[in-house]
Image (cartoon, grey):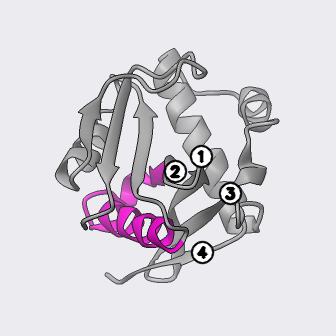
Amino acid sequence: MTWTVTPERFDSPDAALLRRDYYAEVAGRYWGRPATAGEIDEGLTDDGAELLVPPAGEFVVGRLDGGAAACAGLVVVDADTAELTRVFVRPEARGTGGGGLLLAAVERRARDFGIRLLRLDTRHDLVEARGLYAKHGYREVPAFHHRNPYAERWFAKDLGDA
């Protein structure tokens, strides 16, 4: 099994499908039932994906043996800070190292932008994501915003010394 992670437009066919799959999973887990196509469409409408392009950010796609299997986004907040978003690994590819490679790729890109602090929000029920972040040096921090009504946990990683 071979992973590659590269920057890609958020609206490329593979990236768009990964974003749909990401939203379907997080919405479905939140509601306790599969999200409908209409709910997924609504969730992706005006979701800020246009910020996932330089210089405002970046989007990366992970491919496992050539097939699109994972994604992550980076949104620049200010000269020193960016937020990690839309981290997703398809269930069949979990446990193969892709999540760590996604984080490493986004962290490298953040450093290229001059970012020193990478932060994110997540939910209590996304235990796999929380475990991934902790494993890769993200620490739980106090809430740094209240704009996302679904955010329940906040993490950050200092990139300045890494």
Q: Position of residue 160 (x, y in %)?
A: 32, 62
Describe the element under mark 1 as helix, strand or loop: loop
Describe the element under mark 2 as helix, strand or loop: strand
Disc 4 to disc 1, how far (Cα)? 19 Å
Disc 3 to disc 1, how far (Cα)? 12 Å
The residue that disc 2 covers is: 82
Q: 43 left or right of 145?
A: right
The residue that disc 1 covers is: 77
Amino acid type, callout 1: Val
First along the sequence among labels 1 and 2:
1
Quadrant location of the C terminus in the rendered image: bottom left
Which quadrant of the figure has residue 89?
bottom left
The residue that disc 4 covers is: 7
Disc 1 to disc 2, how far (Cα)? 5 Å
Which residue is at a point 50% across and 71% down the rendered structure image? 109
Describe the element under mark 3 as helix, strand or loop: loop
Which residue is at a point 18% across and 52% down the rendered structure image? 135
Amino acid type, callout 2: Ala
First along the sequence among labels 4 and 2:
4
Which residue is at a point 30% across and 53% down the rendered structure image? 158
Image marks 4 and 3: residues in contact by CB distance under 8 Å: no
Q: Position of residue 133 (x, y in %)?
A: 28, 47
Which callout, 4 or 2, points to the residue nearer the camera? Answer: 2
The residue that disc 3 covers is: 52
